[in-house]
Image (tube, grey):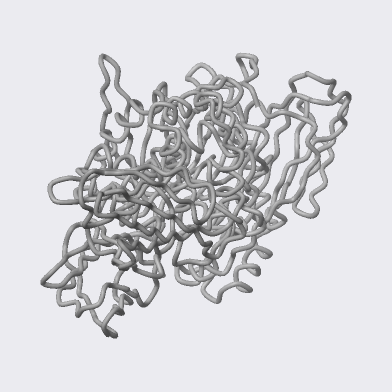
Amino acid sequence: MKPIGLPLDVTKPLTKKSMKNFKSMKTFLFQILVIIVFSNSIEINAQNKLISHDAFTNQSEKQLLKSKDRAFQATITNNYNLNYHRFFWFIDPAKRYISGSVTSYFTATTDLITSIQFQLTDSLSADSVFYKGNKTALSHTGNILTISLNPAVTIGKLDSVTVFYHGVPGLTGFGSFVSDLHNGAPCMWTLSEPYGASDWWPSKNDLTDKIDSTDIYVVMPKGNHAASNGILVSETPWGNTSTLAHWKHRYPIASYLVCVAVTNYARYSDYYKTGKDSIEVLNYVYPEDSVELRPKTLDVLKSMALFEQLFAPYPFRKEKFGHAQCNLDGAMEHQTMTFLGKNSFNHYIFTHELSHQWFGDMITCGSWEDIWLNEGFATYCTALSYENLYNKSTFINFMNELSNDVITNPQGSVFCNDTTSSSSIFHNSLRYSKGAYLLHMLRWILGDHDFFQGLRNYLNDPALKYGFAHTADLKRHLETQSGKDLTRFFADWFYGTGVPAYSIQVNQQQDMNTTVTVNQTQYNSNVPFFNMVLPIKLKGILKDTTILITHTYSGQLVEFNPHFKIDSIFFDPDHKILSYHSEVSLNQVTLIQQLSEPNIVISPNPANGTLFIHHPSGQINFIRILNPEGKSELAITAKQDDTLLALAIQHLHPGIYLLQVGTSDWFETKKFIVIK
C-alpha cells in the first residue's frame, strides 16, 4: 500500500505536552485491565494446567513450539487500507501473557463500509472496541474479529477503531510470542513470520497492505527494556514499579515484521559512517553476554557499506538498524531490529538478516509462494559478502555448500506451491539455497552490469519500494535492463524441479583440432532440458583456454582448435551453474572431475545427531570442528569406511560450525548447522 497522509494528531507521539492528557487515561486503563485479568484468571490458569503441569515452564514451552508447524491464516474481508497502528501493551517477560489496546487508522476502499475485520486468534479475548469515542459491537469467532461501524465509512475516508484485548497468545509457526529465561532472568520475544501476528495482536496479517507508520508503547516491570521497530523515543516511569517505553516507526511495515522483546537488556550502539552522515546500529544484549558480544556486532558495518554500494542506500536511514538478543536458535529480520540468539552473533547471520532490510522488509514478497524474493536474496547476499569482503575461495566454498544442499535433499521448485505450513514455506534447500543459486545463474547469463543494475532498478521502482513484489516484477526489471527474455529460464529454474547433470566428451586430433560433445540428463527433475551457457576450461602445458557453449540440446557438438595439446579439463571451474555430478572424458578416457579442491559432500545440513561426510576414496586422517568463536569442539567418529565418515554431533549446541577434514594429500573446510 502506498503511504497516505495522516492528520497530525494521528501519528504524533506522546510528548510531554500530550502526556498530561494521555495520563488521564491511566486510571481508566488500569481499571479495565484489572477487571479483565480478575474476571479471566480462573480460565487462564485452567488453560495453563491443560498444557503443562508447571504452567508453561521453559522446557515444556520449547517442546510445544517444536510441535506447532501449523500455518494459520483466517481470511478477512479486505475493504480498507491500513494507515497507522498505535500499540499499547502491558507485558511482563516472566509471563506468556499480553494485555492492552491497538488503535488502527484505516481508509475505506469500498463505499459505505459498515464493518471491518482483523485476524485475532481465539485464544485471546477482545474485551471491547471503541469507534468515534463510543463502544461498538464486536464479534470474535473463527479467529476473526469483526467490528461494527455506525455510521458507515465512505470510500476514501480516514477513520479509526481501538480494540482492548488480553490473554495467553497462541503458539504457531516458529513461536509467535515466547517467554523464557536467560541466566535466571525472564525474557520474552515475538516472531510472527509467516502467520503469527494474529497470535498476539488484532492484525490485518496479509501480504497486500503495509502499515504506513506505527507507535509502540510497552509497560513492563522496572529494570527491563523493550526492543522494537524504529526509534526509541523515551523510557519513563509508569507508577512505582513499571517503565513505559515508546518506539516510533515512520516507514511502511508488513504486519509480520512488527516486533517486541523485553528483558533486562544491556544496550550499546555502533555507528555506520558515510561521509558526514551516520546510521546507528543499536544493540540490545543480555548483560551476561555483553562483553563477549560487543566486538562481534562491528562486523555488520562492513556489510552495510557493501550493500549500499551494490544495491541502494540503507532503506531506513532516518531511523536505525539494530540487534536484540533472545533465545532463538537462529534469527529473524524484524524491520530495523533483528532478533537473534547468542550463537547467531556471527558474520553469516548478521549479513543474511541485514540484507533483508532491502530484500524482505523494504520490498516484501507479495505472496508466500514468492518467499525466495526474501530468503534466496538474503542467502545470496551472504555469498556476495564472502566474495567482496573475504576471498574467492571462501565464496566458492559457500556456493559449493549451497549446491550440495540442493542436490542432497528432496527436490522441488523454488516456487512455493504449499503455503499451508511453515516448514514448506521456509524449506532451506529450495527457498534459500536453490533460490540463491538461481540468482547466481542469472548473474552469470546476464553479466554483472545488467544483473546489478537490474536489481537497483527493482529496488528503486516506486511501485515496489516500501511495498510488495512478485517474481514477475523482478523478472521484468532484469529483462528490461538486459534486453533478454528470461521466460524459459524462470520456467526451468523457478517453477521447474531438480537440476541437470552433464557428461563432457573431448576428443583432440594430432593437428589439435578438437571436438567437444555435451550431453545432459536430468536429476530429480520435471524439466525436459535446461538451456544454459556452459564454461569449460581446457588446460595444457603452460597454456589454457575457456570455451563457452550455449547448450540448447543434449549431444550438442562444438569444433575448434585451441592450438595446444589438452591434458586436463575443468567443467564450470568457478561454479556458475547448479548441477549434479558431471563427468568429463578426454579422447574416450574418463577423468575424475577436477576441482580446485576435493568435492566432499556433507549431509544432512542442518544436522541433528549425526553428520555424514561423503569424500573421495581414501582414509580421512584429519578431523576438526570449530565453533562460532573459533574454538575446537570434540569430533566423535561414529563410523568410517573408504568414502563415508559419520560424526556424532549430539554434544554440540545449536548453531553454525566449521568442519575441517582431509588426508595427507588434500584438505577441505565445510560449514554446517546443528539443530535440536
Q: Residue at point 63% right, 38% down?
A: 366
Residue 25 visible to the viewer:
no
The picture places residue 478, in percent across and down from the top left corner, at 52, 30
Number of marks in picture:
0
Q: Nearer the viewer, residue 456 or 17?
A: 456
Q: Residue at point 81% right, 39% down?
A: 77
> Which residue lies most toward the left here?
664
Q: Nearer the viewer, residue 623 or 193?
A: 623
Q: Nearer the viewer, residue 350 or 481?
A: 481
Q: Nearer the viewer, residue 611 or 559?
A: 559
Q: Is residue 462 above or below residue 307?
A: above
Asked whether, in this view, residue 166 is left or right of residue 295, the answer is right
Asked whether, in this view, residue 551 is left or right of residue 595, the answer is right
Q: Residue at point 65% right, 48% down?
A: 198
Can you tell which quarter of the image residue 461 is in?
top right
The N terminus - image quarter? top right
Can you tell which quarter of the image residue 381 is in?
top left
The picture places residue 242, in percent across and down from the top left corner, at 44, 42
The C terminus - image quarter? bottom left
The picture places residue 69, in percent across and down from the top left corner, at 59, 63
Residue 485 visible to the viewer:
yes
Asked whether, in this view, residue 353 is left or right of residue 347, the answer is right
Q: Is residue 214 above or below residue 101?
A: above
Q: Is residue 402 above or below residue 104?
A: below
Q: Residue at point 40% right, 64% down?
A: 581
Q: Is residue 111 above or below residue 671?
A: above
